[in-house]
Amino acid sequence: MTNYSALPTLLANRIILVTGAGDGIGRAAATSFAAHGATVILLGRTIRKLEVVYDEIEQAGYPQPAIFPMNLETASLKDYELLADTLEKEFGRLDGILHNASLLGNLSPVEHYDVKTWYQVHQVNLHAPFLITQVCLKLLQYSDDASIIFTSSSVGRKGRAYWGAYGVSKFAVEGLMQILADELENTSIRVNSLNPGATRTALRAAAYPAEDPLTLPLPAEIMSMYLYLMGPDSREVRGQALEA
């Protein structure tokens, strides 16, 4: 689907929540969604970064976005409920969620894996997408055509040594996606996972410090599949583990 060409109005009048929107793939996706007509809610922990993305979108003349600061490492259930309540009050519905925020953690053998880091990684990569989806399902049900995209990884589809909590969390995300897709099979909400692959991001650089980042595509260069899955052209695509 790398040759997919989205119409400029593909996401017109859609309201889309993007986690990890302050940098990397989340920033590129939020900007791309907005460029195709969506009102984007920028969720992340660093307000300064979110404000930069907000300004870029606004200055480009795209629909005015919104900012919702949230630290997924420390958020409580009440924080997630506040998110859903705020979105319902301000927007009335959701047409899409991109679960993009991820934490790498350590690359080390399971035998020596730091337990605190294990919990932190699962909190961001698995528990947060679960909780956000759970509290926002009602808002997605108000949409005639809603899409949930979970961010996966190659190490979450085939186990690889030393990837520890990150790999396990991505395997769990694939399972969550499949369960949700099956549960929502006969609804207006479709659920899929997307592996962005090797992309020029801070997380990739931390995982592969010896790699030349200039050999990798920029996040903005892999947006075709993100647009396809978030728009109406993928209405019949459900429960699929896809590649960007």
Image (tube, rainbow, N blue to C red):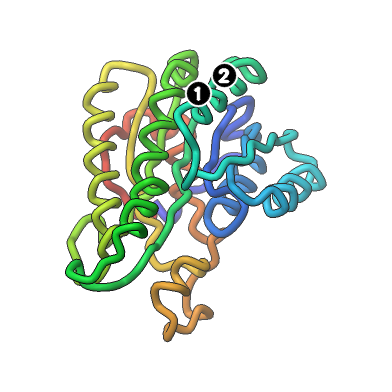
Disc sitting over residue 81 in the figure: 1
Horizontally, is 217 left or right of 137 in the view?
right
Dividing the picture into quarters, in which one does residue 204 lie? Answer: bottom left
Residue for point 64% across, 51% down: 46
Towards the viewer: 59 or 19: 19
Vertical order, 22 against 209 (above or below): above
Q: Residue at x 44, y 32 (%)?
A: 132
* Dot 2: element: helix
Task: State whether residue 144 is above or below residue 30.
Answer: above
Which class describes the residues within 10 Å of circle 2: few (<14), some (14-19), or many (20+)?
A: some
Residue 105 is labelled as: none
Q: Position of residue 193 (x, y in %)?
A: 33, 44
Left-right relation of 151 to 67: left
Query: What's the distance in space between the residues labelled 1 and 2, CA to CA?
Result: 6 Å
User: Which amino acid, mark 1?
Assistant: Glu
Pick the quarter of the image with the C terminus: bottom left
Residue 128 position within the rendered picture, expressed as x and y whole percent measured from the top left:
41, 39
List x then y, in percent, for residue 94. 53, 24
Residue type at the position of mark 2: Asp
- Residue 126, given in percent of the width and then of the height, sits at 34, 44
Give residue 16's quadrant in the image.
top right
Mark 2 sits on what residue? 85
User: Which one is nearer the viewer's eye here, 2 or 201?
Assistant: 201
Look at 64% across and 47% down and name the residue there. 31
Does residue 120 appear to the left or right of 172 in the view shown?
right
Disc 1 element? helix
Residue 178 lies left or right of residue 201; in this view the side is: left
Mark 1 crowd level (few <14, some 14–19, many ≥20, 10 Å Cα):
some
- Report if the CB atoms under discs 1 and 2 are less than 8 Å apart: yes
